[in-house]
Image (spheres, rainbow, N blue to C red):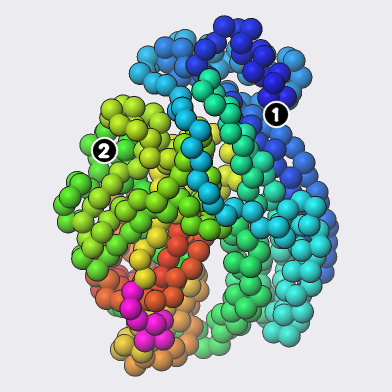
Amino acid sequence: MIDQIKSKIKQSGIKDFEIYFQEPRSYQLFIRRNELEMIQRNERKGASLRIHDGGLGFSVTNIFSEEGIESMIKNAHSMARIGKKVDFEFPSGNKISNVKTVDEKLKYENSEESINDYFKQILQSAKENKVEISFGKLKAFDIKTTILNNNFEKERWDTFFRIELSLKPNGNEFWVNRFSRSLDDIPLSKIEEWMKISKRSLHKAEEPETEKTTILFNPDTIVDALVPVLSYHSSASSKKKKTTIFEQGKLCTPTNISITDEGTHPFALQTHSFDDEGVAQNSKPIIEKGIFKNFVSDQFFAKALGESSTGNGLRQRFSLYLIDDKYLTLPENQTTNLIIHPGTQTLKKLISEIKKGIIKYMSSWLHPYEASDSFGTEIRNADFIENGEITGPVKGGVVSGNVFDMLKNVSGISKEIEVASGGTAISGIMPYMRIENVQVAGK
């Protein structure tokens, strides 16, 4: 199919082009009321085409007949000719990064056995914990991606896992939706932890007071709070548009904060041997002891700034995860896997030092506005902490604030760190963070 597209492009006399071709295969298992409801297998293909001919044109297809291919080429070419003229060239070079992105358990030929066994373990745990899984979905992705432009052709293989569970102890709902690259990154112990949290929310739950208090954010909520904002302000597009608050070499956070963009971390969600334009991903400091170091760029904004792409041209969206349908969207400059460097204290120690506060496990929609850095979100699951002890569940309440104000008020960072996926941002490698003077609205 790629040869067909390439042949048609050459026949059209087009010289500057990029084909992005995805071949995803998946195995999916559905759960309904603690029983297997349905199994689904899926194999499909999709392609997008970018053409540079004065401007940039873009079109997609999943119809690989002669007519479907010709239509994609015609649409992309006409958009390039009538679009705004830009100085652009597709990446060149054959360098790739040596990374771990494939879990053999999630390969298509192994996925049925792996997912079925995983399901049985979850079901047994649900029975032991007396929790009903009213709805659940387990999905293994095995994806081959090919990027071909007028300079090179590259291939990569990736696996992903998605778990979605609605846990209902005695009718109350606790919704879990998580992604990973390896089945082992969401172990049964993690699911049992979710079940225990969901059960705890039934007993003596109280609404928080309206006040500024200490909140201990878990890794998943830190991903949602920080990744969209830090990715935006460290992007070459915000530098070009002069909307970033960052300036290289200047202090931007307290000195206890260090953050790295790590595109090669084993099995992290945004790890690839090369980005979605074919440029090798790598590791680069974003903030070192409070000082801003580097912007991240895709090919378009790197060219606009007279620089080179940093391997951060990704076909991903905050609040909408694109895994097996990345071909539907254009690459944008954004961070890969943000790592907040771990601290020196254990999670247990961080909790023990809190006189009065909250440990937060899940939000309803923690998606800060990227430009203003502000957010407001309902507390979905949390516990009160008093005199260093977890005392009982929180019922309701809203947390609001500003991301950079939060970073100024970090009083502790855990030694524990994990590959996390949030509800509105797909990837981070995060510790627990204790933050002071966070505004809570409650009773």
Above or below, 68 relative to 359: above
Tag 2 and tag 1, C-beta contact below 8 Å: no
Rendering coords of residue 22 (x, y %): 65, 36
Q: Residue at x 32, y 53 (%)?
A: 285
Rendering coords of residue 351 (x, y %): 38, 85
Q: Is residue 323 left or right of residue 309?
A: right
Q: Residue at x 80, y 52 (%)?
A: 109
Checking the image for residue 239, the label placed there is 2
**Viewport quadrant of the N terminus:** top right
Q: Residue at x 51, y 88 (%)?
A: 204
Above or below, 82 relative to 189: above
Checking the image for residue 62, the label placed there is 1
Taking depth in this image into account, of 409 and 96 the one nearest to the observer is 96
Image quadrant assignment for residue 346: bottom left
Image quadrant assignment for residue 302: top left
Residue 347 covered by magenta stretch: yes
Rendering coords of residue 280 (x, y %): 47, 41
**Mark 2: few, some, or many residues within 10 Å (few <14, many ≥20)?**
many
Taking depth in this image into account, of 153 and 340 the one nearest to the observer is 153
Report whether residue 365 is seen.
no
Which residue type does callout 1 highlight?
Answer: Asn
Distance from Cα at disc 2 to Cα at disc 1: 35 Å
**Mark 1: few, some, or many residues within 10 Å (few <14, many ≥20)?**
some
Q: Is residue 266 left or right of residue 439?
A: right
The span picked out in magenta is 343-349
Q: Residue at x 74, y 37 (%)?
A: 44
Taking depth in this image into account, of 428 and 31 the one nearest to the observer is 428
Task: Give SS at disc 2.
Answer: helix
Which residue type does callout 2 highlight?
Answer: Lys
Q: Is residue 347 left or right of residue 214?
A: right
Task: Give SS at disc 1.
Answer: loop
